[in-house]
Amino acid sequence: MLEETTSEIPLDVETHAVEEKSILRFLTCGSVDDGKSTLIGRLLYDCQQIYDDTMESLSSESKTYGTTGTAVDLALLVDGLQAEREQGITIDVAYRYFSTPVRKFIVADTPGHEQYTRNMATGASRCDLAIILVDARKGVVTQTRRHSCIVHLLGIRHVVLAINKMDLVDYDQERFDEIVADYSEFAAKLGIEHIVPIPLSALEGANVSGKSERMPWFNGPTLLEHLQAVEVSPTNRHAGLRLPVQRVSRPNLDFRGYAGQIAAGTVRPGDEVVALPAGKTSTVKRIVTYDGDLQEASAGDCVTLTLADEIDISRGNVICAKEDRCQVSDQFAAEIVWMSEEPMLKGRPYVLRINQQTTLCQVSRLKHRVSVETMEHISGRQLELNEIGVCEMTLDKPIVFEPYMQNREFGGFILVDRLTNETVAAGMIRFALRRADNVHWQAVDISKQVRARQKLQKACCLWFTGLSGSGKSTVANLLEKRLFALNRHTYLLDGDNVRHGLNRDLGFNDIDRVENIRRVIEVSRLMVDAGLITLVSFISPFSAERRTARERFETGEFFEIFMDTPLEICEQRDQKGLYAKARRGEIANFTGISSAYEPPENPDLVLGGGQQSPEDLTETVLAYLQAQGVLETD
Amino acid sequence: MYLERHLKDLEAESIHIFREAAEQFERPVLMYSIGKDSSVLLRLALKAFYPGPIPFPLLHIDTTWKFREMIAFRDATAREHDLNLIVHTNQDGLAQGINPFSNGSAVHTDVMKTQALRQALEHYKFDAAIGGARRDEEKSRSKERIFSHRTVDHRWDPKKQRPELWQLYNGRLSPGETMRVFPMSNWTELDVWEYIRQEDIPIVPLYFAAERPIVERDGMMIMVDDDRIPLAPDETPKTLRVRFRTLGCYPLTAAIESPAANIAEIVDEIRAAKTSERQGRLIDKDQAGSMEKKKEEGYF
Ligand SMILES: Nc1nc2c(ncn2[C@@H]2O[C@H](COP(=O)(O)OP(=O)(O)O)[C@@H](O)[C@H]2O)c(=O)[nH]1
């Protein structure tokens, strides 16, 4: 929505001398050549943050690199590294500083080209406001939409639509109005809350700090007036207390304090608190600081708390108001911005960091990717550099968090690659996954699909066939563990757990063998009906019985996986000594020795047992299932 | 005591960073260079760990060419706060007689500062060096992370910096790699002075105007701090009322003419200042981008 802003914002010191000087962190984004550097240079210049010697070296540099002819090119003030300057581009996030008597400004300056998603997300993560630059001649372009999406995704609520180069469109009000209308329509769809449009000429300084006489039709504030006056989201003072513990301070036996920066809320001695995730409660005894004990501290303050009771609290734990707690979960849905050249791999362990907590995690599911031009969903199997996706995460241990849109410091996390130690992704938590919430059971018949959807998976039967000792059960077991880690609901049927119970009454003659397999098929059908990924590990030597099995399932629900391990290898392994016995004639009808094994003619997957490690074979199955879309849901 | 809100916010951010560094690294060290930024850095560290002591040592790289008043101030400060202070000098450089006069600023800085720092980091096996550098000091610094990664050979690779989001700092290192940590990244020179004033932080008296013996070299006012400075036969130091805006090796640090004799006057002067503080540092003068080159080579 567009904001009406009063233009009567005094710039002079007097009126504001009594008010506290605050910090505003903002982001500037625009396509190459929209005039971003010129605008920042102009702001710095107008606020007299540019020293004579800097100006001096600037005018000599202007001759070499500048684009403004003989005039000093203010853009060069902010174009950082030498390498970039020679290429005439900026390639990373740079921070600039300037201040007026009422505010200190920290500007995250991000480039508008290729790597923009990663860099913008980085720059935007701590900002409260974004200036989105538009060239008046070009209007709203693809880049404008991209930048707005990222700004919105990172939770920035205030946008300045800076329509620059008004001098090149004759300071035309109609052109301005047209662009504003165009942008507003798009921004409304995104849900950006506060938009303030300002017509500018960064080059001439029009409406940057001083009103432009060329645009009398504009009654809004100048850019600087707005930056000084804008009320950004109030700090989380009034929320419940959240203090993530950075370190436990124990200088001597008599003192045990919990040091951290208050992320939200206010604390006073005597307040009842709870330490999460453990859930132990106590009351605050003292708020200790170098400058003396405090009677009250609130969001933003760095303090050390002591508690009335000796409870076990360590780094990463969160001290919360007892009556207003954070959420704790080991599974959640999050938006992820991928920042590494190496694509995101589902199921691969990454180190997750959120406030002071660290744990291993896996992306269990990529629900969909998000278009940075429209925020629309696009389907996808993986995330590449600069792509954004909505993912489901599974953690090794529960963490304390809040949805990102509610509390950035408690909902924003990074993923770190365990081997390279690079920061590979940034994430914003949307909500914890409480699986049962997803199904409104009163309304629907409970079908196989509904049961499977409740488990966020597709039910199927993975039928492992192969000789005794071929490695079926080893791989099936490993696979089940991997699926379990990916949050899939599984069950493994094999000779051992079926023969000892359900089929205890059956022997090994032909009739009993047929009955044995029939029961296994029916049980696995029931389990698939229950929504489970069912692994069956049976020698099942005859094509006919495997065909029967397949026929009992729906298309795409049954996968025949052939452990193609040569007999010699199986016999060498002979873990249970069965081959030896069979060779001595002590076991009749032993598959491979005294009874035939009919290799599958059209198995869904063949595993070269004996050539690869069970771990590798497991990964092959997993990759196959992924490729078949079995691990996708819906 | 009253601290303005923007300074309180900066202070809180720095304290948070200090605590992260203490927790994330095995052997961090605080780079103490005695100047005003170091004085603020020290105060922030004291605040971060109060009521406990600073849980890591301080390291001063002594080129042997610091102002004498700096060394006196350093030792007094260490005594007052009972600091674990390590002073390291490049003994090879000393033996070779490296000095700013005959070897020039570039060689002197490389041997006695850059190499000395590397020696100390390696010798004590420090995995993180916490320093007082600010992003507003110089263009190449404006892109540097708060947790800034250094390769095994102490190089900074500006193209391979880790994205740094929110207040999440990734301090994970592979063997041999190190980190530079800059808790004061978001401070400006004016913030530093205002903080010193509001917090009443002691600083080396060289920052205040006083009569000092000065010779002029290449338009720079150099203080004759001891008799190692070679004087031309016709050269006699003049007594001038000067002060310093930054402090380093005395032959490489130019004084400015200024009447500012207390912090309040300095703050006023900085507010109205027309030149950047780096102007007084001879080592940056070479060419545009020179700082960037030094950093890639491992200058702090
Ligand atoms: N006429 C006009 N030119 C501008 C304006 N702002 C910037 N420019 C020019 O546009 C070009 C690109 O500006 P620059 O600030 O480097 O763009 P950046 O890539 O967004 O940082 C330069 O030649 C500027 O001088 C403006 O308001 N009016």
Image (spheres, coloured by chain):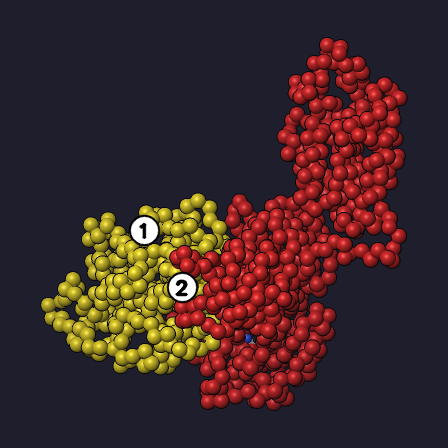
Residue at coordinates 79% horizontally, 50% vertically from top-left?
Answer: A453
Q: Position of residue B209 (x, y in %)?
A: 25, 77
Quarter of the image where one finds residue A406: bottom right
Q: Position of residue A561 (x, y in %)?
A: 76, 32
Chain B colour is yellow
Give left or right: position of A342 versus B129.
right
Disc 2 target residue: B50
Give the amino acid at mark 2: Tyr
Please tell me which residue lies in front, B194 or B1.
B1
Quarter of the image where one finds residue B86: bottom left
Q: Label 1 near label 2: C-beta < 8 Å?
A: no
Please tell me which residue lies in front, A523 or A274.
A274
Residue at coordinates 65% horizontally, 50% vertically from top-left?
Answer: A394
Give the amino acid at mark 1: Ala
> Quarter for ligand 1?
bottom right
Disc 1 target residue: B120
Residue at coordinates 32% horizontally, 53% vertically from top-left?
Answer: B117
| Farthest top residue in view | A584
Give left or right: position of A383 versus A77.
right
SS label for mark 2: loop
Closer to the N terminus: mark 2 or mark 1? 2
Q: Position of residue A586 (x, y in %)?
A: 75, 11
**Number of marks in the rendered image:** 2
